[in-house]
Image: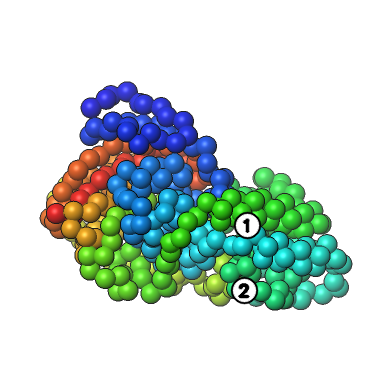
């Protein structure tokens, strides 16, 4: 075991020697390559890590599962590497984004669609009234009226295209990628909040200009991805989540790879609430969607009237300490582990015998008490029939997430499990 951090830039060598407890600093060069840079998404994989894991632990033509798909980074890399993949996520925005990023598009169809949309967008004349703007909570607080009109104009141009839905969805994601920037919300916070002290400037015409800029970049990325992507499929079902995947057969997956949410770290529906509303993937309250997420903070007071146990002795001792300070946070941590253990069991079901499950997960500080998720997963996994093959650390250097310094997650722990 090395006590020093090994720094690597760009692609990770396939023959890299990895021992238990090793520490690495992987510096990414491809975070905006191919379709990875189409849309901002918090706490996502940097592409080189899943690329290296997929090449190291699977073969061409294998089927890869990511049960906490997020923005689909591992699915993009699997497709480029000639693997089939399945991506699971409870969030409808995540599923739409990942489908767009992993669906190769013929250049002529993409260019034809852009020519029509571009012509429509450039002929924008500000209307007297709001038309084509969806209704959603606090809409007029989030956006100035002139921006609402620009966004509605762009969205109308996309919806009126006569083409395949895959082409429309590509441009819808390009449209979605500018929504936070032209809103009154802080661009870089995972919570969608307005911060007056930022004195954010949103000017007339900004929506039109940004849409053109972002779409041109996304089209270059899609062109590069489509040229590289060999035959294969990416399946993103709507009827699954990480704890229950009924459409995936027993013993059918060659490898699983994921970076699950951190306990109470990112409220994804709140992060993408404006995008969800404009894409009409949500209406009204987001509370029901929040409750479905692993790591959610949406819990009821009746849930934490008493201390619960997870079945992992080490975790239960820590949760008991948290409970003394904050029963609600203790239950959030408990439910997170219930969900993660359910995921371990479900992935075990669908994996072929001898196949690996690689988990990249961070720790948390809950009421100033360290909550070491990787230890609890490694401790519980053998009870389900996994062998623990390896564990090492990947240091984090880029933070899209704005969190207090003492609560910031600086290390990801990479756990390699294997179904016996």
Q: Are marks 2 and 1 in contact (CB under 8 Å)?
A: no
Q: Residue at x 46, y 60 (%)?
A: 231
Residue 373 appears in view: yes
Residue that numbered label 2 is attached to: 164
Q: Quadrant of the N terminus?
A: top left
Q: Nearer the viewer, residue 348 or 83?
A: 83
* Secondary structure found at label 2: loop
Q: Is residue 142 left or right of residue 299?
A: right
Q: Position of residue 417 (x, y in %)?
A: 22, 49
How crowded pointer 2 is (Cα within 10 Å; few <14, some 14-19, many 20+) is rated as few
Say which element carries label 1: helix
| Residue that numbered label 1 is attached to | 177
> Which numbered circle lies on residue 52?
none
Task: Quadrant for the C terminus, please.
Answer: bottom left
Residue 263 shows up from this direction: no
Label tally:
2
Where residue 219 sits in the image (x, y, percent)?
65, 55
The mark closer to the camera, 2 or 1, is: 2
Quadrant of the rendered image containing residue 173: bottom right
Query: Marks 2/1: CA distance?
Result: 21 Å
For residue 201, side relative to residue 318 (left or right)? right
List x then y, in percent, for residue 192: 57, 57
Does label 2 or label 1 sit earlier along the sequence? 2
Residue 295 at x, y = what percent?
A: 36, 58
Vertical order, 398 against 274 (above or below): above
Q: Can you say whether 120 is above or below 178 in the image?
A: below
- For the residue pair 22 and 301, the one nearer the viewer reads as 22
Q: Residues within 10 Å of mark 1 (few under 14, many from 20)?
A: many
């Amino acid at each position: 075991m090395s006590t020093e951090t090994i720094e690597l830039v760009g692609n990770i060598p396939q023959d890299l020697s990895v021992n238990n407890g090793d520490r690495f600093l992987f510096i990414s060069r491809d975070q905006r390559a191919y379709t990875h840079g189409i849309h901002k998404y918090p706490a996502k994989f940097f592409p080189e890590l899943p690329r290296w894991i997929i090449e190291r632990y699977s073969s061409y033509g294998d089927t890869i599962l990511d049960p906490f798909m997020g923005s689909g980074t591992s699915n993009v890399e699997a497709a480029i590497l000639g693997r089939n993949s399945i991506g699971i996520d409870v969030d409808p925005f995540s599923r739409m984004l990942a489908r767009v990023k992993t669906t190769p598009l013929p250049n002529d169809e993409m260019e034809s669609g852009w020519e029509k949309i571009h012509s429509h967008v450039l002929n924008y004349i500000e209307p007297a009234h709001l038309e084509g703007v969806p209704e959603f909570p606090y809409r007029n607080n989030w956006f100035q009226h002139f921006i609402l009109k620009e966004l509605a104009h762009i969205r109308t141009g996309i919806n009126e295209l006569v083409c395949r839905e895959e082409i429309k969805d590509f441009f819808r994601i390009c449209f979605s990628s500018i929504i936070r920037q032209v809103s009154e919300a802080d661009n870089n916070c995972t919570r969608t909040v307005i911060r007056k002290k930022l004195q954010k400037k949103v000017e007339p015409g900004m929506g039109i200009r940004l849409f053109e800029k972002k779409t041109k970049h996304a089209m270059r990325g899609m062109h590069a991805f489509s040229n590289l992507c060999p035959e294969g499929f990416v399946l993103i079902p709507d009827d699954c989540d990480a704890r229950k995947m009924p459409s995936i057969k027993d013993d059918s997956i060659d490898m699983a790879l994921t970076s699950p949410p951190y306990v109470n770290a990112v409220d994804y529906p709140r992060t993408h609430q404006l995008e969800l509303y404009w894409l009409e993937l949500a209406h009204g309250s987001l509370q029901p969607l929040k409750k479905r997420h692993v790591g959610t903070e949406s819990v009821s007071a009746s849930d934490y009237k008493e201390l619960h146990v997870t079945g992992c002795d080490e975790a239960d001792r820590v949760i008991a300490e948290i409970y003394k300070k904050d029963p609600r946070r203790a239950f959030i941590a408990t439910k997170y582990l219930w969900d993660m253990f359910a995921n371990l069991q479900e992935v075990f079901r669908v994996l072929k015998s001898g196949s690996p499950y690689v988990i990249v997960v961070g720790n948390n500080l809950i009421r100033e008490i360290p909550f070491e998720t990787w230890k609890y997963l490694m401790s519980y996994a053998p009870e389900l029939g996994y062998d623990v093959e390896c564990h090492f650390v990947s240091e984090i250097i880029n933070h899209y997430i704005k969190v207090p310094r003492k609560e910031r997650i600086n290390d990801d722990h990479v756990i390699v499990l294997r179904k016996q």
